Amino acid sequence: MAKKKSETPQLKEYKSGTTFAGVIGRTYDSSSPAWPEPNRTKPGAPNVLFIVLDDTGFGHLGCYGSPIKTPNIDSLAKNGLLYNNMHTTALCSPTRSCILTGRNHHSNHVGCLTNGSTGFPAMTVTCLLKMECCLKFSKTKDTILTVSASGILHPKRLCQPQVRMTDGRLEEALRDTTDFLEAILISISRTSQRQYSDRPEKTPDEGYHFTEDIVEQAKAMIADSKQIAPDKPFFMYFAPGAMHSPHHVRKEWADKYKGKFDKGWDAYRKEVFEKQKKMGIIPKNTVLSARNADVQDWKNFQKMRRKFMHA
């Protein structure tokens, strides 16, 4: 005779803020528990992959007129929205604080790089991810997400005990200018509240690169979250080193563009600018701004460079 499958008892719940829906008797046998109903993801809530590219300009992506090949991003742009009004804080830490919280960076006390804390208002760098400035996505009404992060975060003080990741974990470079070939990574787990650092399993000679490493870390985080809660959407904050120093690109990638940019930054600006006008990203009557006075003319720069190399 087949045994009946044991059924998991359903927890009795009640709306948060309302009267306790259980029974409190004189003994345990005459009592029944109940729990406040938690926020739950609405049916059909999407997964979110949020990619931050450090020091990457408006005209560095193929879909914005760049000669640099970015086919995957271009395909996403064709099926989504292409914005043409971009603003940044021009620095790593403040930008991340805005993205992660939805608040002005001065409201987050991150008016500068995290390693430049001055001890004055808006520059204390003490509330980047405090509970009152926590991840905007973890506070979304009626939505609970698995929040993970992989890559360069650049909040130096992120490792303080005040940090709380919503049902998630972090995998980041120990410093913002980490060596992409010999990176030191740190991991923070919300469940254990532990932090540990580690070196990559492979060496540069064996093919290690930071970007590929954090891609695998991100995939593992997503896989873990789906194993534990298949129906629960995830929010993945993914921040590769991109164009942030140091510029440790693989040789095979660099070789693809050998000689492509020999005309210099002035020619690049003009080329992308004209292409953006043709694509309708900027108005046809737009005038190219003057080069920043602190940036040298490309030809003069090349002369100085050759002179320095032969000195």
Image: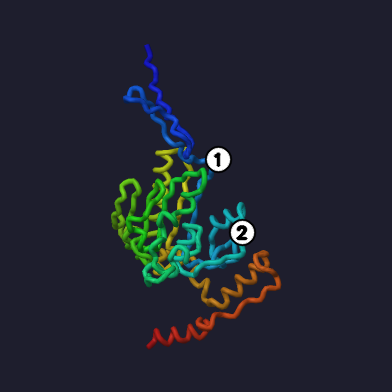
Q: How many marks?
A: 2
Residue depicted at x 37% and y 57% = 172
Residue depicted at x 52% and y 71% = 260
Viewer-nearest of discs 1 and 2: 1
Mark identifier at residue 82 = 2
Secondary structure of the residue carrying tag 1 is: loop
Amino acid type at mark 1: Gly
Splitting the image into 4 quarters, where does residue 76 fall?
A: bottom right
Residue 85 locus on image (x, y percent): 61, 65
Amino acid type at mark 2: Leu
Secondary structure of the residue carrying tag 2 is: loop
As rendered, which of 119 and 56 lies closer to the eye? 119
Determine which residue is flagged by label 1. 44
Splitting the image into 4 quarters, where does residue 115 fall?
A: bottom left
As rendered, which of 178 and 75 lies closer to the eye? 178
Residue 20 locus on image (x, y percent): 43, 33
Mark 1–mark 2 CB contact (< 8 Å): no
- Relative vertical location of residue 288 with respect to residue 80 in this rendering, above or below: below
Residue depicted at x 29% and y 57% = 199
- In terms of sequence position, does the residue under pointer 1 or pointer 2 come before the other? 1
Instruction: Locate the N terminus and report the quarter of the image it occupies.
Output: top left
Label 1 packing within 10 angstroms: few (<14), some (14-19), many (20+): few
